[in-house]
Amino acid sequence: MEVSGPLHVRSIPGLVAGILFCVLAGSLGSMVTVTGPESWYATLEKPFFTPPGWLFAPVWITLFTLMGIALFLVWDAGIRNRHVQIAVIVFAIQFALNILWSFLFFGLQSPYLGLVDVVLLWFMIAATIAVFAKIRKMAAVLLLPYLVWVTLATALNYAIWVLNP
C-alpha cells in the first residue's frame, strides 16, 4: 500500500507534533541516565569503541527527530488504514522498548536486562522499518540511522555486560 509520488506534508502542526512527541517521550529515559564522575556508569569498564559522552545527547535528539518525522509520514498516509494502524503499533512497541532500556540499564543498573531489551529493540526497529517501507519508503529510510546507532549500542551494551561480570 505504498504511498508514492511527491511528498506533500498536509499538516505542519502534525509534523511538529510527531517530532515533539518523539523527542519529549524519548527523553523520559534521561530521568534515570546518570553518567557523571560519581555515577555507577562511571565505575564500569567500557570497551575501546565507547563514544564520548558528549555525543549521546545530540545523536539521540537527531534520532528522535527523525523518528518523529517518519512516524508523521506514516500517520499522514491515513491512520484509518489498517496497514498504517499496524505500522504505528509496531512503532509504539519499539519506542517503548527504547525508553525502557534506560530504566533497565541505568535505573536498575543492569547491563544484562539492558542487553535483553536492546536486542529486542533492534529487531523491533527492523520490523518498524519493514512495515514503514510498505507505506512510505522515506519513512523507512529515516529510521536507518537509528538502526545503525542501536547496532552500536547493542555491541556497547554487550561489551559492558561481558567486561563487568
Image (tube, grey):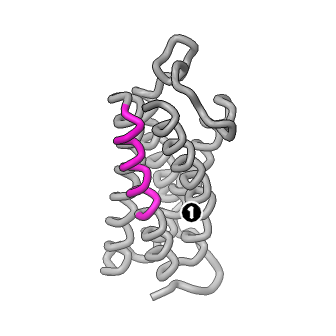
The residue lying furthest to the top in this view is 38
CA neighbours of label 1 inside 10 A, class few (<14), some (14 to 19), many (20+): many
* Span highlighted in magenta in the image: 110-123
From the image, give the main secondary structure of the stretch colored magenta. helix
Closer to us: 6 or 105: 105
Which residue is at 59% across, 32% downward?
46
In the rendered view of the protein, which quadrant contains the N terminus? bottom left
> Please, what is the three-letter code of the amino acid marked with disc 1?
Leu
Q: Eyeballing the image, is 156 above or below 13?
A: above
Question: Is 28 part of what is drawn in magenta?
Answer: no
Q: Which quadrant of the figure has residue 121?
A: bottom left
Where residue 116 appears, as percent x and y from the top left, is 37, 49
Question: Is 121 part of what is drawn in magenta?
Answer: yes
Where residue 115 appears, as percent x and y from the top left, is 42, 46
Numbered marks: total: 1
Residue 42: in sight, yes or no?
Answer: yes
Closer to us: 165 or 76: 165
Where residue 124 appears, as percent x and y from the top left, is 41, 63
Q: Please give left or right for residue 14 compared with residue 46 in the image.
A: left
Which residue is at 61% across, 58% downward?
148
Which residue is at 63% across, 43% downward?
59
Q: Which residue is mark 1?
A: 143
Q: Eyeballing the image, is 83 above or below 55?
A: below
Q: Please give left or right for residue 4 compared with residue 126 in the image.
A: right
Q: Eyeballing the image, is 152 above or below 111?
A: below
Q: Which quadrant of the figure has residue 159?
A: top right
The secondary structure type at the circle numbered 1 is loop
Which residue is at 42% across, 32% downward?
165
Closer to us: 60 or 119: 119
Residue 28: in sight, yes or no?
Answer: no
